[in-house]
Image (cartoon, grey):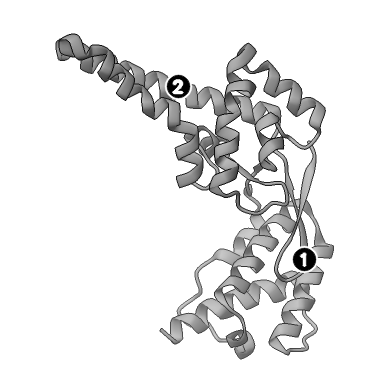
Amino acid sequence: MANIRVETTQNVDIQYEVASIGDRILATLLDYLFFLAYSVLILIFLALENGYGKNTWVVITVCSLPILLYDLCCEVFFQGKSFGKMIMNIKVVKLDGTQANFGAYLIRWLLRIIDMRLFSGVVALVAVLINGKGQRIGDMAAGTTVIKLKQKVHLRDTILNKIAPDYTLVFPQVSRLSDSDIAIIKDVMKVCLRTNNYEAVEKLALKTKETMGVTVNMPHVQFLATVVQDYTYYGSQNQ
């Protein structure tokens, strides 16, 4: 599958892997299982209530709204993920890797009728295969795609460990960094170490040193991990 390139605010390029067709199909099937479970519960409810008499179709229509609005509401409230996508660890993003907005989610939802409902999803499948960027018709119109989220990698997980009680601050200059800087460092480290993109790690380390105003001869991964630990310690001491 293709990758999409994202440039962070620290001018570091990272790449995200576009979700495979298999991942997207499985996510959709999982969503359908939620639909099925919900429908069964509604039918049981109606049976217990004797169908609400003449108002049966009104009740059925109202109860069908969550299924109709499912994809739109999930992507809006869960930042590009339905429950199926959560399980498959994939999400909807803008083509440049940034967070999609409501307008993009709405376009994807409106065009889902063409993509997914007509010919049982064949239109979406053909569009994704031809497009090369993991985009169905709704994605093309909205400028979005679906990417794989971060996966487990042993080395990168070390930068997220809690600091030891006897931890000693190494770089007091971390006070010059912000929460968003640290969030970017963590994010880039996770992606780059998973993809072995050490060039991006080096670029990020050099940019971080420049921002902090430090000169140190330390391996880039170790330096960035230390910065994250220092910032965590610094924050805990200044609350």
Percent of width and height locating residue 37: 37, 21
Q: Secondary structure at mark 2?
A: helix
Q: CA distance from mark 1 to mark 2?
A: 40 Å
**Label 2 Cα crowd, 10 Å radius (few <14 / some 14-19 / many 20+):** few
Amino acid type shown at disc 1: Val
Q: Is residue 83 left or right of residue 119?
A: left
Residue 202 in sight here:
yes
Is 96 above or below relative to 159? Answer: above
Q: Is residue 190 left or right of residue 77?
A: right
Q: Residue at x 75, y 25 (%)?
A: 127
What residue is shown with label 1?
A: 12
In this view of the protein, which residue sits in the foreground, 151 or 134? 134
Q: Earlier in the sequence, mark 1 or mark 2?
A: 1
Percent of width and height locating residue 100: 60, 49
User: Residue 236 sits in which quadrant?
Assistant: bottom left
Is 151 above or below relative to 231? Answer: above
Numbered circle sitting on residue 33:
2
Residue 51 in sight here:
no
Percent of width and height locating residue 45: 22, 18
Q: Secondary structure at mark 1?
A: loop
Q: Is residue 220 left or right of residue 111?
A: right
Quadrant position of the C terminus in the picture? bottom left
Is 178 above or below relative to 49? Answer: below
Q: Residue at x 65, y 71 (%)?
A: 225
Is 232 above or below relative to 67? Answer: below
Percent of width and height locating residue 228: 60, 74
Q: Residue at x 73, y 57 (%)?
A: 193
Numbered circles on residues, count: 2
User: Residue 69 sits in which quadrant?
Assistant: top left
Q: Residue at x 77, y 37 (%)?
A: 133
Amino acid type shown at disc 2: Leu
**Labels 1 & 2 near each other (Cβ < 8 A):** no
